[in-house]
Image (cartoon, rainbow, N blue to C red):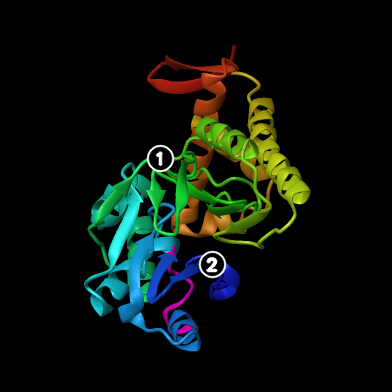
Amino acid sequence: MIFGDNGGRFPHCHTLLLIESEEITLFDPQCGRDHLERKLNNVGKSWKNIKNIVNTHFHADHTASNGFIKNKNPNVQILIHRDDAKGIESTEEYFRRYGLNGKAKTHYKSIFKYIGYRQTIPDRLFEEGDLIPGGFKVIHTPGHTPGHCCFYKSGILIAGDVDLVGRPWVSNTTSNVNDFYKSINKLLNLDFNVFLPGHGRPIFNKTEILSELKIYQKKLINTGKKILDLIDGDLTLEEILNKRDRERDTTIWSQNPFMKLFRRYDTLNYLYYLEQMGKIKKVERNGLNLWEKK
């Protein structure tokens, strides 16, 4: 495991480097390019030894170096779940899935330039249950993104952004709270004692892993309950957002243009979840979309 630059935080992540004879498979190779090259040199390898790149999902803090590595070695095969493939094939589709527009889109383009992001065409699309390089089994774990996947083999889980950092991140237009909850249930039914996340710290104790996954999952429920408690009548989305802002440090959410959008999508996704659970309903009155408890 190569710990990512910036502590493995955005716009970087931790990278898994798997060596089989002279061939290398990289899982989410966005640890930092100089950092990655040093690690390759340390094990007597180079860019030409990389055979496969496996992405857990389409987000740039996991995929931004795909194109750079492909340019270094055109024979590299890029693998991703079919439901996230469009997100790396087209930057415009990436922005659409992120829900970025206006100033937020402009701001994010500057991040793309900083990290040298290039759109790439995947060479192989995988699905639930497929075997990928290294003998890992694909575990489709949607919620963070529609095509987010973990990879499982012999007690080892490569977890991507089921990373146990903060609370589950469901702040894009394509995120889904209920799917994330079900995905964690799927992981809880696997037998593993090595947990390798895309961010945060690895864990090497089965009891601790299961405990942390349950705590992480419960945060989805608790956040939903907090939003439900805010609905004390017929409220617009803006009114609910204002109520949430009063209960948190709003600096990061209110001043950064794309974080403001993420706050909106995060709230909307929890409202959709509560609606799906039969707790609230959306009604239209006087041209306004309102949310109210059932």
**Near-viewer residue (288 or 283):** 283
Q: Which quadrant would the C terminus be assigned to in this image?
A: top right
Instruction: Give how far across and how far down residue 192 sits, in percent.
Output: 65, 48
Residue at horizontal 55%, vertical 73%? 2
Give left or right: position of 46 versus 4: left
Residue 242 place in picture, x, y as percent: 59, 39
| Stretch of the chain drawn in magenta | 27-35
State whether residue 201 appears in this view.
yes
Checking the image for residue 14, the label placed there is 2
Q: Where is residue 144 in the image (x, y as percent from the top left)?
A: 49, 44
Residue 117 drawn above or below residue 57: below
Establish if 24 lies above or below 277: below
Q: Would you say residue 101 is visible in this rendering?
A: no
Membership of 218 in magenta stretch: no
Q: Which of 121 and 291 is in front in this view?
A: 121
**The residue positioned farthest toward the front in the image shown:** 21
Q: Do the residues labelled 2 and 1 touch (CB within 8 Å)?
A: no
Q: Residue at x 36, y 66 (%)?
A: 64
Report which quarter residue 202 is drawn in: bottom right
The amino acid marked with disc number 1 is Pro
**Dot placed on the residue nearer the N-terminal end, 2 or 1:** 2
Q: Nearer the viewer, residue 269 or 177?
A: 177
Q: How crowded is mark 1: few (under 14 residues within 10 Å), some or many (20 or more)?
A: many
Please state, as top left, top right, bottom left or bottom right, where the N terminus lies in the image. bottom right
Res 59 → quadrant: bottom left
Q: Residue 146 carries which label?
A: 1
Crowd class of label 2 (few under 14; some 14 to 19; many from 20; radius 10 Å): many
In the displayed orientation, state which residue is furthest to the top: 294
